């Protein structure tokens, strides 16, 4: 049974159709048309396609934000409208919908409260996430003052505040600079190595190519291609050989050898070229090492600690025991003042039990706590036969009644 549960896909979509209609119930657009795919546990899945291909509509149906016209959708084996499922999902929408009057720290604290996280957990995760996305230096600025790229960074942080099992990212690199784009891709890969399931939707193919293990390509609401990166991108008609720098004579010899062996030839010889992205990142990293001041997002944040590895077993119990040990001991209940003479000596307990009711009645005071004690059950006791003269003698220092001083 456990094996079958492990094999169950995190997201299962079968024959999904979504049609938008106008006021007169006439079909206005068929955004999704017969889409079928599944996302396995721990997989980084790519949902690709140009603008208007149905990516965002499919994601909103998976999240339960839209109702499908037909077809079946299951998330963690349950309908997407199940409230319990939503606690296990982190979502970064295509547009950042944030409260503009809150700052970054207040934003993350607010979303942490929605997931009912403890105050200390919210504070710790907020610190780690702000450092991870490079906004620790501007955490007290209102979100409305952020650039679009900075808003995407805080949006990514809020999608991770609950440490989700399923992370859905809709165009996560929109508005980000090359450094931010590289950080997002590194984060996706790190979360994938941890075993999280990620659905990445984008039309920037170069970003997706570096991250996903399997993908579907949509166009016009239908799937046009599906498979792993190797299955879809590996060329079947050419070979690539990379060596150290060759001179013209060596290239000519290789070409002659290929022609003799099978009528092949060297089609193109070129020198490796650094990408513009690599050059850009190298320049920025050099500026960071030189501690050049900037008013924008920082680029030195590491992956948040709570996202790096699964919690250690028993850590929550240890934390709870430590907190309990730090709590002050409850104060002892106050007791009514009692005469010192009557409370000293070997017979103090016996005398206290005999005199306590009389003292309370004489003073008119209630016992500690302000409540009248319930009458105790009567039991055989020799108290009724006690010689009061003996008691008076003990209270008066051992003198018998009527004796001369």
Image: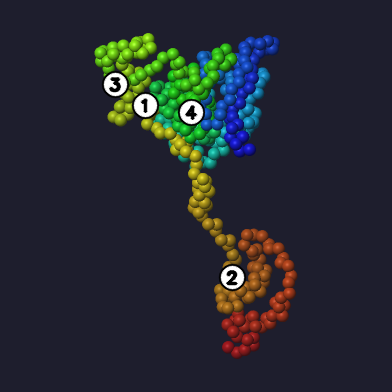
For the residues labelled 4 and 2, the Cα–Cα distance comes to: 67 Å
- N-terminal of the two: label 1 or label 3? 3
User: How many residues crowd mark 1 within 10 Å: few (<14), some (14–19), many (20+)?
Assistant: few
Which residue was labeled with disc 3?
A: 244
For the residues labelled 1 and 3, the Cα–Cα distance comes to: 43 Å
- Is residue 159 visible to the viewer in this orientation of the structure? yes
User: How many residues crowd mark 4 within 10 Å: few (<14), some (14–19), many (20+)?
Assistant: many
For the residues labelled 1 and 4, the Cα–Cα distance comes to: 20 Å
- N-terminal of the two: label 1 or label 4? 4
For the residues labelled 4 and 3, the Cα–Cα distance comes to: 42 Å
Residue occupying the point 68% across, 82% down: 387
Assign the N terminus to one quadrant of the image: top right
Residue 357 horizontal/vertical position (percent) = 67, 70
For the residues labelled 3 and 2, the Cα–Cα distance comes to: 99 Å
Which is in the foreground here, disc 1 or disc 3? 3
Which residue was labeled with disc 2?
A: 338
Circle number at residue 72: none
């Amino acid at each position: 049974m456990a094996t079958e549960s492990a094999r169950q896909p995190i997201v299962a979509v079968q024959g999904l159709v979504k049609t938008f209609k106008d006021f007169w119930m006439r079909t206005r657009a068929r955004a999704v048309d017969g889409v079928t795919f599944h996302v396995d546990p721990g997989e980084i899945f790519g949902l690709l396609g140009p603008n208007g291909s149905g990516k965002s509509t499919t994601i909103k149906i998976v999240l339960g934000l839209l109702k499908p016209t037909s077809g079946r959708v299951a998330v963690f084996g349950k309908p997407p409208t199940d409230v319990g499922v939503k606690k296990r999902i982190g979502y970064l929408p295509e547009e950042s919908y944030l409260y503009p009057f809150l700052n970054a720290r207040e934003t993350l604290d607010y979303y942490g409260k929605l997931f009912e996280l403890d105050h200390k957990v919210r504070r710790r995760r907020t610190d780690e996430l702000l450092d991870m996305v490079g906004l620790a230096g501007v955490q007290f600025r209102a979100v409305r003052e952020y650039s679009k790229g900075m808003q995407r960074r805080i949006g990514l942080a809020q999608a991770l505040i609950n440490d989700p099992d399923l992370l859905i990212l809709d165009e996560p690199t929109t508005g980000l600079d090359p450094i931010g784009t590289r950080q997002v891709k590194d984060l996706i890969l790190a979360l994938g190595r941890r075993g999280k399931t990620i659905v990445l939707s984008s039309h920037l193919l170069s970003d997706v190519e570096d991250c996903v293990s399997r993908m579907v390509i949509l166009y016009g609401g239908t799937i046009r291609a599906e498979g792993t990166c190797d299955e879809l991108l590996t060329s079947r008609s050419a070979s690539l050989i990379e060596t150290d720098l060759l001179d013209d004579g060596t290239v000519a010899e290789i070409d002659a050898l290929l022609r003799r062996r099978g009528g092949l030839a060297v089609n193109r010889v070129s020198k490796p070229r650094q990408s513009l992205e690599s050059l850009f990142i190298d320049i920025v990293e050099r500026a960071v090492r030189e501690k050049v001041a900037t008013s924008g997002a920082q680029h030195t944040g590491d992956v948040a600690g709570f996202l790096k590895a699964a919690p250690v077993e028993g850590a929550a119990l240890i934390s709870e025991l430590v907190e309990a040990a730090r709590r002050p001991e409850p104060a002892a209940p106050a007791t009514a003042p009692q005469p010192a003479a009557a409370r000293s000596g070997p017979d103090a307990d016996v005398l206290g039990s005999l005199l306590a009711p009389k003292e309370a009645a004489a003073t008119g005071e209630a016992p500690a706590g302000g409540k009248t004690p319930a009458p105790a059950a009567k039991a055989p006791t020799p108290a009724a036969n006690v010689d009061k003269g003996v008691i008076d003698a003990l209270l008066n220092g051992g003198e018998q009644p009527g004796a001369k001083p």
